[in-house]
Image (cartoon, rainbow, N blue to C red):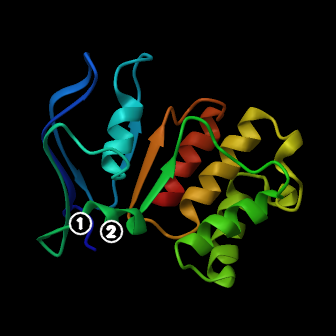
Amino acid sequence: SIMGQILLSVRNVTKTFGTLNALENFSVDIDSGAIIGLVGSNGAGKTTLLRLLCGLYRPNQGKVLFLKDGKENNIDQFREVVGVLPESTGLYHRLTAWENIRYYSRLHGVSDSVSWERTLRFSKALSISNDLMRHTRGFSRGMRQKTALLRALAHGPEILLLDEPTAGLDVTSARLVRRLVL
């Protein structure tokens, strides 16, 4: 889809958990090609918003609309075009970095060769191409973060959602990621 086109529209969304108001009357439009980093204190509603955008949560009020070619689509279809880097990387420690990435890409229906080509390109830029065949068990936080980032990018998403994106990533890597993706 075209850069600068609204892909996701959050309209007056409220999400509550019992008596807790996680988000209240929140609205935002997200364009195709956007990179969005959610930054804020714990309990500010970042993770809740992320899960609403991915269709994992449904709002109590308001709407989350996935727009494709100007038409409203089911939010579940949005998962195909989104790359998500959650706060907790959720890597499988028994798998190598590449196996983690390949598994996720296959879930998105992306061939291993396409996924590998993208992974190699991004991993070189992040200086971790030599670590792709290592098991992630011994990885530092920064290495886990980079692996999770590669995993989020491998299927060629139109939108990248980052929860606490700079945690564990050095500034140079964070800037590099932005340049690579755009």
Q: Nearer the viewer, residue 158 or 93?
A: 93
71 left or right of 82 in image = left
Dot 2: element:
helix
The CA distance from mark 1 to mark 2 is 6 Å
Q: Secondary structure at mark 1?
A: loop
* Position in image of residue 89 (x %, y %): 64, 42
Residue under label 1? 74
Residue 127 locus on image (x, y percent): 77, 52
Q: Nearer the viewer, residue 31 or 98?
A: 98
Q: Are marks 1 and 2 in contact (CB under 8 Å)?
A: yes
**Which quadrant holds the N terminus?**
bottom left
Mark 1 Cα shell of 10 Å, populated few (<14), some (14-19), many (≥20): few
Q: Residue 100: horizontal and vertical position, in percent?
A: 72, 60
User: With respect to residue 11, does 21 lie above or below?
Assistant: above
The total of numbered circles placed on residues is: 2
Image point 54% across, 43% down: which residue?
175
Q: Which residue is mark 2?
A: 77
Which amino acid type corresponds to the residue marked 1 in the rendered image?
A: Asn
Query: What is the quadrant of residue 68 in the picture?
Result: bottom left
- Which residue is depicted at the point 11% across and 71% down? 70
On screen, residue 40 above or below 58: above
**Residue at figure coordinates x 62%, y 81% from the top left:** 114
What is the residue that sits farthest to the front in this orientation?
A: 18
Classify 18 as above or below 166. above
In the displayed structure, would residue 38 be above or below residue 108?
Answer: above
Quadrant hosting residue 32: bottom left
Residue 27, picture quadrant: top left
Q: Residue at x 52, y 36 (%)?
A: 165
Please name the amino acid that badge 2 sits on. Answer: Gln
Q: Is disc 2 surrounded by few (<14), some (14 to 19) or many (20+) residues within 10 Å?
A: few
Relative placement, left or right, of 167 versus 124 is: left
Q: Position of residue 95 (x, y in %)?
A: 82, 57
